[in-house]
Amino acid sequence: MNRKLILIFLLPILSFLLTSCNETRGIDTSELEAQTVGAKIKRSGTTFPSGTPEERQLALADAENRLKSGGGLLGKKGLSLGEINKSEKTTTTSVGLPINPYLWKGSLETIDFMPLASVDPFAGIIITDWYANQGAPNERCKINIFIKGYEMKTDNLKVNSFCQSLSNGQWVDIKNNIDNDAKLENAILNKAKKIRLSQS
């Protein structure tokens, strides 16, 4: 008798729960049905003028996340992947921390012969692994590059190099040569300028 009463009481509740579960009550993702990639990106607020396939994939992933969630980390307006500042005639990348894309690309191309240990485009940090030149196998160096700021200038670029020499089977630190760091900074800056000129 008690079981029948419990079942009579529970049946309407179970019916309601099952009906509710079957309803589509999620976030409206109708914006995701945009016909083209460009439309998705435009609707989401993610912007960039043009770019490589990697940049388009990053922008598309960001756009779809924004359309699903109704906004991103900094709101639905989105983050710029190469916004052109017409007053300063410079292009800036502002994903996470804003950095200059030409300095970023120039840095990577300047040290492309070295193995990379860590790369963080959001913070503008490039850290190489130890590299030994074939002509001097008893010496090795690694480089840390820090990029900050919108403008393409040496103040927004910092290079720290660390070198070691092999002595009795042990790697021993060599005193850092500040002049070499400055030369590498200038090489990166010149490379960045060439990249910007080639894209203008």
Image (cartoon, rainbow, N blue to C red):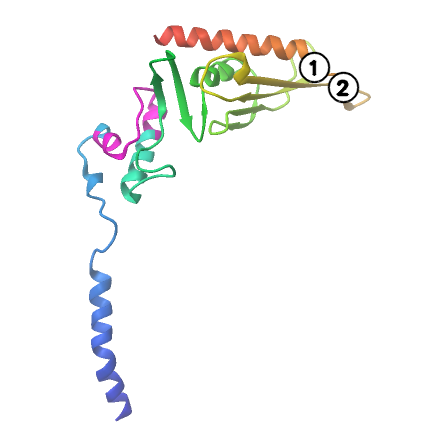
Q: Which residue is mark 1?
A: 137
Disc 1 element: loop
Q: Is residue 111 visible?
A: no
Q: Label 2: how many residues lie within 10 Å, few (<14), some (14-19) or many (20+)?
A: few
- Verify CB contact (< 8 Å) between mark 1 and mark 2: yes
Q: Which one is nearer the viewer's eye here, 83 or 172?
A: 83
Residue 2 position, x and y percent, is 28, 91
Q: Quadrant of residue 102?
A: top left
The kind of residue on which mark 2 rests is: Leu
Left or right: 144 in relation to 46: right
Q: Which one is nearer the viewer's eye here, 70 or 134?
A: 70
Gap between marks 1 and 2 measured at Cα: 9 Å
Residue 189, compared with residue 168, is above or below; it is above
Q: Quadrant of residue 136?
A: top right
Left or right: 156 in relation to 80: right
Left or right: 7 in relation to 156: left
Residue 82 position, x and y percent, is 36, 21
Residue 185, compared with residue 57, is above or below; it is above
Q: Which residue is mark 2?
A: 166
- Single out the residue that lies furthest toward the bottom: 1
Q: Label 1: how many residues lie within 10 Å, few (<14), some (14-19) or many (20+)?
A: few
Residue 177 position, x and y percent, is 70, 12
Residue at 36% across, 9% down: 199
- By secondary structure, the bulk of the magenta-drawn segment is best described as helix
Residue at 34% across, 8% down: 200
Residue at 30% across, 39% down: 66
The kind of residue on which mark 1 rests is: Pro
- Single out the residue that lies furthest toward the front: 87
Per the rendered image, the range of residues in magenta is: 39-58
Going from N to C along the chain, the mark reached first, 1 or 2, is: 1
Q: Quadrant of residue 180?
A: top right
